[in-house]
Amino acid sequence: MAGKPKPMSQIKQLIRLYQAGTGKKTIARDLGLSKNTVKAYISKLQSLKVDLGELLSLDDPVLETRFHAGNPAYKDTRYEQLKPLLGDFIKELNKTGVTRHLLWEEYKELVPHSYSYSQFCYHLWQYTLASHPSMVLAHKPGEKLYIDFAGKKLSYTDPETGEVIYCEVFVACLPYSDYGFAMAVPSQRIEDFIYALSCCLHDLGGGPQVLVPDNLKSAIVKASHYEPDVNRALEDFANHYQCTVIPARAGKPKDKALVENQVKLIYNRVYARLRKRQFFSLGTLNEAIAQMVRLHNQTRMQQKPYSREECFVADEKHLLKALPEQAYEIKYYRELKVAKNNHVFLAQDKHYYSVPYQYTGMKVKVIYTRSLVRIYAKGNQVALHKRNYRPGTYSTDPSHLCSQHRHYLERSPDYYKNKARAYDACLGKLFEQIFTQDKYPEQLYKSCDGLLQLARNTSKEQLRQACEVALAYQNYSYTFMRNLLTNKVTLPTRQQPPKPLPQHGNKRGKSYFQTILNLF
C-alpha cells in the first residue's frame, strides 16, 4: 500500500470477494492486483474491526480515509510544535528585511528537534494558503465595470521631430461577460482618465450600476480599506451617468481579478500583435487598438461555447443604463472673492469674469468646465460665462454693471443721437452735426453729456432757439451753447421792407445837385 492508492471501486470489489470467502490469490488474479497488495488491504480490513457491509455502504472518498489516513507529516510532534508559531511567522514575514531563512533560523533556536528548511517553507506556504482562501464572486449582468491602467505602455512617433511618445493604456471590462475595452491616453491625469472612461461607456452603449476603479490618484484621493476618498471629478462623472463608485480595496488586486486578467490578455492580443507596427499619431494608435480589442472580444473562449461579444450582446447590453444626451465635462471648483470692479479672477486661465455688482466684496463659489464658468452666491447661480482662455482679459456681462458703469459702456454716436432726437428734433440735428467733426470720440461724448445736461435745465423753446443759432454759425461746442442760453441770444428777425416817404413839396432833384457841383 506504499505505492499509488487503488481506486475505491476496485477496493469494494476486493471487500466483496473477501466477504464471500474467496482466496487471496484468486482475488489478485480476478482484480489484476498483486498478491502483496491484496494481503495489505485484507490486513487493513482485519485491523479496522468494522462490519464489511458498513464499509461497502460508504462513499468512495469516505472509504478512502479508512485505508489512507493522509500525510503522516501532520501527525508528527514537530508539526504540533510548529503549528502555533506559523501565525506569528506570517506577520513577521511582512516586515522589512525579514526572510523565510531568517525565520527558520529563529525557529531552530526555539525548537530543538525542528524541520529542515524545505519542510519549514512547505508548512509555512500551506498555512498561508489555508489562512487566505480565494472567494468565487458571482457577477450580475450589467452591474459592474472594472477599471484599471495597464502597467506597460504603448507608443507612437512624432512625424515632425521623430520623438517616441509613450502613452498609458486604459483597460476596462464587464465582469459578467468579460467584455473588454482598451484605449491609449497621454497620461493617467484626471482629464485623460475621465475622457477614457467616457469613451468606454459610449463604446458599451450604456452605463453600469457600479464603477470599480483601482486606487490610482485619478480616481481615489486617499486609499483606504474601508472608506476611500473618491476624487470629486469621478464622483461628478458617476452622478452624471447615474452610477456609483465602489473602489477596490488597497492592495487587494483579487477584488478586480477579471480586469487584471484582462490586462494580461491585452498584452497578448493587442501589444504583441502591434509590436512590429509604427504609428505617427495617437488617433491611428487607438484605431489599431480598437481593431485588436474587437477581435479579442469576438474570439471564442476556451471553456465556453461563445465569445465575449456574444455574451455581452445577448445578456448584458440591454441591461445597461441609457447614457445622457449631453456629454460629461470635468468640473473644477474654486472659492473666490469678488473684486471692487465686480469681477473674479480665475487664476487657471488668468482671466476675469463679471459678477453682479451687488456681490462686490463677497466670496462666491465658481464651478468651471472646459466650456462654461458658473458663479454661485448664497446658493444661487448669479453668473454664467463662456470660458475664455485669453489671459489678462475680461468677460463682462453688461447686466452685471451698475447703471453708471452700464451707461459708460453703452456710449456711442447712435446712443447720443437717439437720445437727443427723443428730447427734441432740433437737438437731434445738432448732435448729428457734432459727430461729423474730426475729433476723438471720448471728447465728443463729454460734449454731448454737457449739452444734455443743459437741455434738462432749459425750456424747450429756449433750447430750440439756441440750437438754431449754433447750427447757423456751425459752432457745436458746449461752451458756445451755454453762452447762448445764458445770454438768451437768438437769431435776428427778418427785416421789414422800407416804408415810402410822405408826399411834400420840399424836394431837391438831380438838377439841384448838379448845379451845386458846377459851382465848385
Image: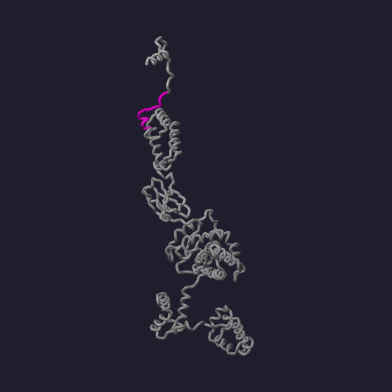
Quadrant the N terminus occupies: bottom right
Most foreground residue, 250 or 364 = 364
| For residue 157, above or below residue 382 | below
Q: Residue at x 43, y 53 (%)?
A: 391
Specify whether 340 is left or right of 304: left
Q: Which residue is drawn at the image coordinates 44% and 60% (left, top)?
A: 231
> Which residues lie in the magenta part?
481-493
Please check the rendered image and state whether residue 395 is part of the magenta-colored stretch, yes or no. no
Instruction: Look at the image and tell me in which quarter the C terminus lies.
Output: top left
Residue 462 image offset from top left, x and y in percent: 39, 28
Nearer to the camera, 411 or 481: 481
**Is 133 located above or below residue 82 in the figure?**
above
Front-most of residues 286 and 211: 286
Residue 35 appears in the figure: yes
Q: Position of residue 170 (x, y in %)?
A: 51, 65
Q: Is residue 5 left or right of residue 460?
A: right
| Quarter of the figure with residue 456 | top left
